[in-house]
Image: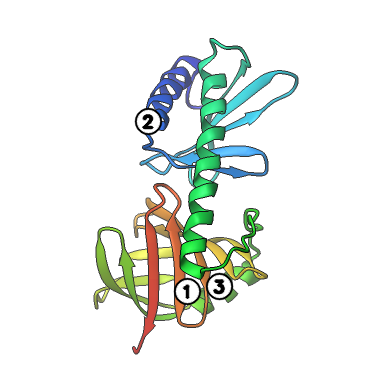
Amino acid sequence: MILNDAQINQIVDEVLVRTGDGQLRWFCEDDHLLAELPNQTTVEVAQGQDTDVVVSLKSASGIVYGQMKAPKTPESAVAKLYTLAHQHAGKSIFADIMDSLKLSGSATVEVVQAAPRVSPEQAVEVLQRMKGSWNLDFTSGKEHARISADGDYFRNGGKDPAFRLKVLAWNESKSSAEVAKDWPDGRRLQIESLTIARDTMTGYAKHDGHKLSYTRTEA
């Protein structure tokens, strides 16, 4: 472990403030509550044994920076975070349901579980689906993207790849994937949750929820 309990407590206090201010988007995955911090660290809170709550801080690749257990008592900051994260995860699900209703015009909504982890063969399949030229419309702007079969991502006609894509999860029945977008030096920009069709890829960035819309174009 890199972080000690005092450091984790300080981080928890700050995460509590940011969660209360609505600056972090929480998700529920396998009974764990997760939020991605701006530096691509994930904070995770979960019910431990008995009445304990466990908070963990992990890198984008799953390395555990620190972990701490705390009793589920009213004065515990970790317990407060667990309760607040539950509330915000519910709000995130509600917002996604309402967005899907507005987009589809359908009253039939299914709450989808997290996509299963991905095998090497599935990762190849997903990148094949993503291969090609795309116009990307996102919250703060637009860009043209060209994606190669090995995951190189070129922006706006650039000769060198701006990012390297890594498939983290794939749910074939839903055509949904989680794809990391990494800088060439290995730093992670974001993880994108996408529903992939032949000519469109739509979804959001997991760290802040901003919308993503890819439309296939001619090369």
Q: Amino acid at mark 3?
A: Val
Q: N-terminal of the two: label 2 or label 3?
A: 2
- Outermost residue, bottom side: 218
Residue at figure coordinates x 46%, y 14% from the top left:
6
Picture coordinates of residue 45 (x, y %)? 58, 31
Real-space CA distance between mark 2 and mark 3, rounded to the nearest whole angstrom:
34 Å
**Marks 1 and 3 in Cβ contact (< 8 Å):** no
Q: Which mark is residue 126?
A: 3
Q: Secondary structure at mark 3?
A: helix
Q: Which mark is residue 208?
A: none
Q: Which mark is residue 18?
A: 2
**Marks 2 and 3 in Cβ contact (< 8 Å):** no
Picture coordinates of residue 129 (x, y %)? 52, 78
Which numbered mark, 2 or 1, is in the foreground of this view?
A: 2
- Outermost residue, right side: 50
Q: Secondary structure at mark 2?
A: helix
Residue at figure coordinates x 67%, y 44% from the top left:
30
